[in-house]
Image (cartoon, rainbow, N blue to C red):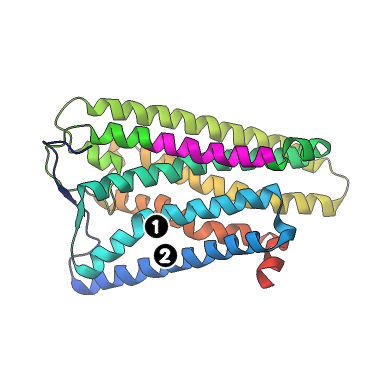
């Protein structure tokens, strides 16, 4: 994918100019990264080892934890290493790998969150058909479809982005290789293809979000009709964490790519990028474990 008119390496945005603040950034990001590794690793290990959690809901949760690990490992380690070594460089191939892996995890996670909403809908609104609709084979196919869709989505974005000639320097105003920042380096109108692809992506993400919202409208209507208060509490405890994760994921991603140019500034872009790329993988395990009694008991064991 290398282009003769493109730089051989890029310069990422430094969080700070002084050595003390660079080490502070290194310590903060390292702490967040290790916490995300520990939390997601605990969920993966717990779900895999506890046979009581071998159900569709926890099967998809395990895949979500894997994607969160991959997502945060795509951007944060390179930023940590650069702060420690007092450098800003990332190679052309390293940048392409970041773009591919980031879009892969984002695309797969969007598909997986949609599947998880469908799983909750079937469990609460059509419980008599749950065993048929959410059997082992069906769950494996849905999870595989989420991973494959993420792979194709990432491949399309990566090939399209790095086929554009980049001749406006090599400085990116972001701590990882973000596509909007790469497009600013374009020296031809071919960047409009990637802009169009981002627009199509927003349309597809909006479709997934609409499906999730409609699913939860039906779910909450069914929950509110339940005669048992204990049944309503159990249903809410299963659904609210997923809804919170979806809200965090969708709202931060949409704000990052749909905010008006008048609101754009290096400081704001940096904060938004941290919020949508670093925070969700770190807090998703906490959101799922806080209200989930079964998962908390399994974690204690």
Number of residues whose C-alpha sits closer than 10 Å to that of mark 2, classed few (under 14), some (14–19) or many (20 or more) = many
Q: Classify residue 223 by image quadrant.
A: top right
- Quadrant for the C terminus, please: bottom right
Q: Classify residue 183 by image quadrant.
A: top left
Estimate the x, y position of residue 97 in percent, counting from the top left.
31, 47
| Above or below, 40 relative to 242 | below
Q: Residue at x 31, y 50 (%)?
A: 268
Q: Residue furthest front?
A: 137
Estimate the x, y position of residue 228 in percent, counting from the top left.
87, 50
Q: Pointer 2: what residue?
A: 33
Q: Secondary structure at mark 1?
A: helix
- Quadrant for the N terminus, please: top left
Characterize the magenta stretch by its predominant secondary structure. helix
* Marks 2 and 1, the one that precedes in the sequence: 2
| Above or below, 50 relative to 273 | below
Q: Is residue 177 visible?
A: yes
Please report the bounds of the magenta region as a residue range.
Answer: 137-154
Estimate the x, y position of residue 146 in percent, counting from the top left.
53, 39
Q: Secondary structure at mark 2?
A: helix
Residue 149 colored magenta? Answer: yes
Q: Residue at x 44, y 53 (%)?
A: 70
Left/right of residue 138 with respect to residue 264 in the rendered view: right
Q: Pointer 1: what residue?
A: 73
Residue 224 colored magenta? Answer: no
| Above or below, 37 relative to 252 | below
What is the number of the mark on residue 65?
Answer: none
Estimate the x, y position of residue 294 in percent, counting from the top left.
73, 61
Q: Residue at x 27, y 35 (%)?
A: 161
Q: Is residue 265 visible?
A: no
Judged by depth in the image, the label closer to the viewer, 2 or 1, is 1
Tag 2–tag 1 contact (CB < 8 Å): yes
């Amino acid at each position: 994918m290398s282009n003769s008119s493109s730089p051989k390496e890029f310069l990422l945005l430094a969080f700070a100019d002084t050595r003390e603040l660079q080490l502070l950034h290194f310590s903060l990001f390292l702490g967040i990264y290790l916490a995300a590794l520990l939390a997601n690793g605990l969920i993966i290990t717990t779900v895999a080892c506890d046979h009581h959690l071998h159900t569709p809901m926890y099967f998809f949760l395990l895949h979500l934890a894997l994607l969160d690990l991959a997502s945060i490992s795509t951007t944060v380690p390179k930023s940590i290493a650069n702060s420690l070594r007092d450098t800003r460089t990332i190679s052309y191939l390293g940048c392409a790998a970041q773009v591919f892996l980031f879009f892969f995890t984002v695309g797969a996670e969007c598909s997986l969150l949609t599947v998880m909403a469908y799983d909750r809908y079937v469990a609460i609104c059509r419980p008599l058909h749950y065993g048929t609709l959410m059997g082992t084979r069906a769950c494996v196919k849905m999870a595989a479809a989420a991973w494959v869709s993420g792979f194709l989505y990432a491949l399309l974005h990566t090939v399209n982005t790095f086929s554009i000639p980049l001749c406006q320097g090599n400085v990116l105003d972001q701590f990882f290789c973000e596509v909007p920042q790469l497009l600013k380096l374009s020296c031809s109108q071919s960047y409009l293809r990637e802009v169009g692809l981002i627009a199509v992506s927003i349309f597809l993400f909006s479709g997934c979000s609409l499906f999730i919202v409609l699913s939860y409208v039906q779910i909450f209507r069914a929950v509110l009709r339940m005669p048992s208060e204990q049944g309503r509490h159990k249903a809410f405890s299963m659904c609210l964490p997923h809804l919170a994760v979806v809200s965090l994921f969708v709202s931060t991603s949409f704000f990052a790519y749909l905010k008006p140019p008048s609101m754009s500034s290096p400081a704001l872009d940096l904060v938004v990028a941290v919020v949508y790329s670093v925070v969700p993988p770190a807090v998703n395990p906490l959101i799922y474990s806080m209200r989930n009694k079964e998962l908390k008991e399994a974690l204690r064991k």
